[in-house]
Amino acid sequence: MKIYFKSLAMHLKGELEYRVNFILSFLSQILVFFTYYFIIIALFARFDNIKGFTLYEVLLCFSIIQFGFAFNEVFARGIDKFDELIIQGGFDRLLLRPKNIILQVLCCDSDFVKASQLIQSIIVLGIAVFHLNIKWSLLKIFTLIFMLFSSCIIFFGIFLVAAAYCFFTVQGLEVRNVFTDGGKHMAQYPIGIFQKGFVYFFTFIIPYAFVNYYPLLFFLGKKDNVLYVFSPLIVLIYLIPCILIFYFGMKRYTSVGS
């Protein structure tokens, strides 16, 4: 991990070499994030609730999923841009080094501009929690922590599967965005508001529901099942096949040449 943190420091120093560009990009990401935020605000200007979920309950759901996505955009950018690593032949060099390959890929890139979205998601989370008047307990504190943690893990797993896809296609085709950006936009709302087919898919195939729906029900006091507190930890099981799929693809990788 020492190598990883050194690489983060190096990437940050490199981005700050062009400070004007960094600042403008940082501000543009703030505007992009708030377009998502204002869309939800505009939606609730017309409706009081969506299947029993109020504005700030949806914003809480929104902030948790955005936190996990932004976290991976900042700290796992190498996985997200894995197709470029394949195309440019950089992955061939990584295979020659005696270090864990996933760690090396993580060290390849980071994007601190996206930290703006990470900060904003925390701000929206604080606003939502403040307006919800949560009756705090130790279990609810753990629930919130587990939701944030599992949000980071699930997107890391999805990025790994998308990276494994590049072993077979070389380029990362846009179909993978159905499960990354598309999944993010769907999961920023409580999964229970959608049709049963979508609920089953995003519960048992890509377990977004265990990240910010079932634990959200307990956190908001809508359900009192204590198992919902620990349901976000299911994504750790989901991460195992994601890692295995990545290594499966790597074993069948043939160099793209140089």
Image: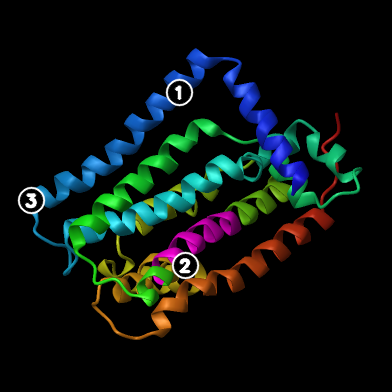
Numbered badge on residue 46 = 3
Q: Which residues are magenta?
A: 143-158
Of 83 and 100, nearer the camera is 100
Three-letter code for the amino acid on which mark 3 is drawn: Arg
Q: CA distance from mark 2 to mark 3?
A: 32 Å
Measured in 3D between alpha carbons, the distance from the residue under mark 3 to the one under mark 1, in whole angstroms, is 33 Å
Amino acid at the residue labelled 2: Phe
For the point 33% across and 69% down, which residue is it?
Answer: 216
Q: Looking at the picture, how far across and down is residue 51, in whole percent?
A: 17, 68
- Give the SS element for disc 1: helix
For marks 2 and 3 on the same chain, the one whose residue lies earlier in the sequence: 3
Residue at which label 1 appears:
25
Who comes first in sequence, dot 2 or dot 1? 1
Q: Find residue 28 and report its horizontal and vertical position in percent.
A: 38, 25
- Residue 85: x percent and y percent? 73, 36
* Mark number, residue 146: 2
Left or right of 22, for residue 47: left
Residue 159 is a magenta residue: no
Main secondary structure type of the part rendered in magenta: helix
Out of 31 and 165, give the one closest to the viewer. Answer: 31
